[in-house]
Structures are given as structure tokens and as C-alpha cells.
Amino acid sequence: MYPKIDELRLIMGNSKREADVLGITETWLNTTYSDSYEPIDGYNIERRDISTGTDGGVAVYLHDGEPCNRRHELEKDQFEDLWVEILCPFSIGILLGTAQRPPDNTRNGNWCSLIESTLEITQGERNETILMGDIFKHKLCEWRSHK
């Protein structure tokens, strides 16, 4: 992500309508990069950095002033996902998940089942749930409806 930060700033700064949220996969960020490396004016960042290797990592940029809570308890150790609850005044909140499908989807268990287990945990909450990322590249699993 670091090599593309200027492009991201240009896109986010010049858009006719400001985006409230921007999810990014394959950030390639690790703990050697501080949040000051990738600031975009008007946005706060939540990151889940890669722990080993050079590929991976997920991040979410949230518009300044967007009240939210990071939901660490929903994040899995087996793959890279990041969950943020956006608090909407006078309305139900939004549970936003950004996930990156492992290159080998059999690595560390079935990632579809892991995402579904997270959705089951949140089923009773008063939130709309949005899941985004590169997880939908291939039809690798049958999704069940979680209402």
C-alpha cells in the first residue's frame, strides 16, 4: 500500500462525493510502518498488518468523525480480517468486515467456515453487516444466509 499512497490520496481527495469508508487488502504493511506513513487527510485508519512474509494485510480508512469501535474479538488468527462497528446515531449500526482470502484457501482451515462463524456470533446484534475484500474472487464455498 505504501507505494500507492499518493494515488489513494489523489482518488480520495478528488472524488466528487467523499467516501465514508475505504477497505484495502494486500496492504503489505507490517509493524515497521507507523500510521504516519499512510495518512489520508480527513480519514482515520484501522490496520491489521501482516505477521510473516511480505504479502497480505488489510486496512480500513474511515471518514473523520465517523464514530466507530474496532471489534478485535471477531478477528481470526487463521487469516487476515478486520472488523469495525460504525455507530450510526438514531439508527442501527453497521458492522463492517474487510477480509483477505488466503492464497491457499486450505491453509489454516476452511476460511469460509471461519467467516461464517463470525457472522453467526454477530447474528443477534442490531447491526447491518457488510463484508468486503478479495474473498469473492472465486466461488470457493457456498454461503449460507445469516438473517
Image (cartoon, grey):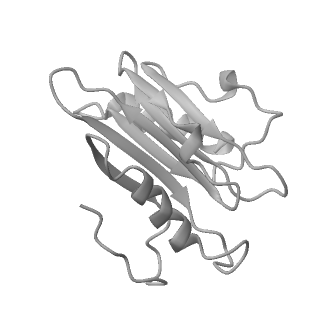
In this rendered view, identify the residue nearer to me: 84 or 10. Answer: 84
**Above or below, comparing residue 142 to residue 66 in the picture:** below
Q: Which residue, as the protein is rendered here, is positioned at the far top? A: 65
Kindly identify the residue that appears in the image at 52 percent across and 48 percent down: 24
Kindly identify the residue that appears in the image at 50 percent across and 23 percent down: 44
Q: What is the quadrant of residue 145 in the picture? A: bottom left
Kindly identify the residue that appears in the image at 31 percent across and 26 percent down: 87
Q: Which residue, as the protein is rendered here, is positioned at the far left? A: 90
Q: Position of residue 46 (x, y in %)?
A: 56, 32
In this rendered view, identify the residue nearer to me: 116 or 17. Answer: 116
Q: Position of residue 109 (x, y in %)?
A: 68, 75
Q: Position of residue 111 (x, y in %)?
A: 58, 71
Q: Quadrant of the C terminus?
A: bottom left
Q: Which residue, as the protein is rendered here, is positioned at the far front? A: 124
Q: What is the quadrant of residue 47 in the picture? A: top right
Q: Quadrant of the N terminus?
A: top right
Kindly identify the residue that appears in the image at 31 percent across and 42 percent down: 125
**Above or below, comparing residue 47 to residue 104 in the picture:** above
In this rendered view, identify the residue nearer to me: 10 or 126. Answer: 126
